[in-house]
Image (tube, grey):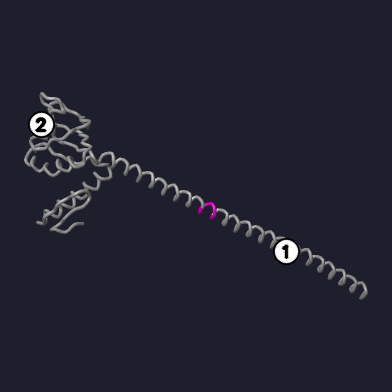
């Protein structure tokens, strides 16, 4: 009887040892699978991070390239507009537009050879409009811009032919000038700069 008991205990211990081995093997396999999964997850995160960095770099490069193109186009447009002027508040009446411009120039005592003269913007019957005049000669244009103050009190105004960015800048400077003038300060705006109480900004 004692011998049989001893044999059973041995077999039981052997079975427990085998079972323990299987459990440890299964646990080891599970641990390996978890480790492998975590490694792949981390690698996936690294790959996604690299892809994200590449996308961000490409986007930034495209943004910088676009800025460069816009700057070049703006510069080219500014060069093309440099020799032009805009006359606001001009009426054709019975004369042709070019004749009206010549008449206006004579009133400010300027003899200016002109290239293209055309009406721009929306035209309404019996209302003053805007005209684009291509002067070309920068010395004559400078003279026109210096003498345009002689039109003070009249409907007509002579201005530079500005790009959209330049117009936006001048508009913002105008807001600043009006605010400063309401506070009793003297201002003067000249091509993307403003002078307040004698100091240029």
Q: In this view, does 93 lie above or below 144?
A: above
Counting residues from the start of the chain, the first of labels 1 and 2 encountered is: 1
| Image x and y of residue 184, in percent | 9, 56
Q: In x, y percent, where is residue 197? A: 13, 58
Q: Is residue 133 magenta?
A: no
Q: Which residue does the image show at 13% across and 39% down from the upper left?
A: 157
Mark 1 element type: helix
Crowding around mark 1 (Cα neighbors within 10 Å: few <14, some 14 to 19, many 20+) is few
Indicate the quadrant containing the C terminus: top left, top right, bottom left or bottom right. Answer: bottom left
Chief secondary structure of the magenta span?
A: helix
Q: In which quarter of the image is the N terminus?
A: bottom right
Which residue occupies 22% across, 35% down?
Answer: 134
| Whether residue 49 is situated above or below residue 81 in the rendered picture | below
Q: Is residue 30 above or below residue 79?
A: below
**Residue lying farthest to the bottom in this orientation:** 2
Which secondary structure, mark 2?
A: helix
Return the residue found at the far left: 153
In 3D space, how far apart are the residues under numbered discs 1 and 2 (Cα atoms)?
100 Å
| Residue 117 sits in quarter | top left
Residue matched to label 2:
103
Q: In this view, does 59 lie to the left or right of 28?
A: left
* Residue shown at the point (14%, 40%) measured from the top left: 144
Q: Residue 140 placed where, x, y %?
A: 17, 40
What span is colored magenta in the figure?
49-53
Kindly indicate the quadrant of the structure image that contains residue 113: top left
Camera-side residue: 168 or 115? 115
In the image, residue 50 lies in the stretch drawn in magenta: yes
Q: Can you identify the residue that label 1 sits on?
A: 28
């Amino acid at each position: 009887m004692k011998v049989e008991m001893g044999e059973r205990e041995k077999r039981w211990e052997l079975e427990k040892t085998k079972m323990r081995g299987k459990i440890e093997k299964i646990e080891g396999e599970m641990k390996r699978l978890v480790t492998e999964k975590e490694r792949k997850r981390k690698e996936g995160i690294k790959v996604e991070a690299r892809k994200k960095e590449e996308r961000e770099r490409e986007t930034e490069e495209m943004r910088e390239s676009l800025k460069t193109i816009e700057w070049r186009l703006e510069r080219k447009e500014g060069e093309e507009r440099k020799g032009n002027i805009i006359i606001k508040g001009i009426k054709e009446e019975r004369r042709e537009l070019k004749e009206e411009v010549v008449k206006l120039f004579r009133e400010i005592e300027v003899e200016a050879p002109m290239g293209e003269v055309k009406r721009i913007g929306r035209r309404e019957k019996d209302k003053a409009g805007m005209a684009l005049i291509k002067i070309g000669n920068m010395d004559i244009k400078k003279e026109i811009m210096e003498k345009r103050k002689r039109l003070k009190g009249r409907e007509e105004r002579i201005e530079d032919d500005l790009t959209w960015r330049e117009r936006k800048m001048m508009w913002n400077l105008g807001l600043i000038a009006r605010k400063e003038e309401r506070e009793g300060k003297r201002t003067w705006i000249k091509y993307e700069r403003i002078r307040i109480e004698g100091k240029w900004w």
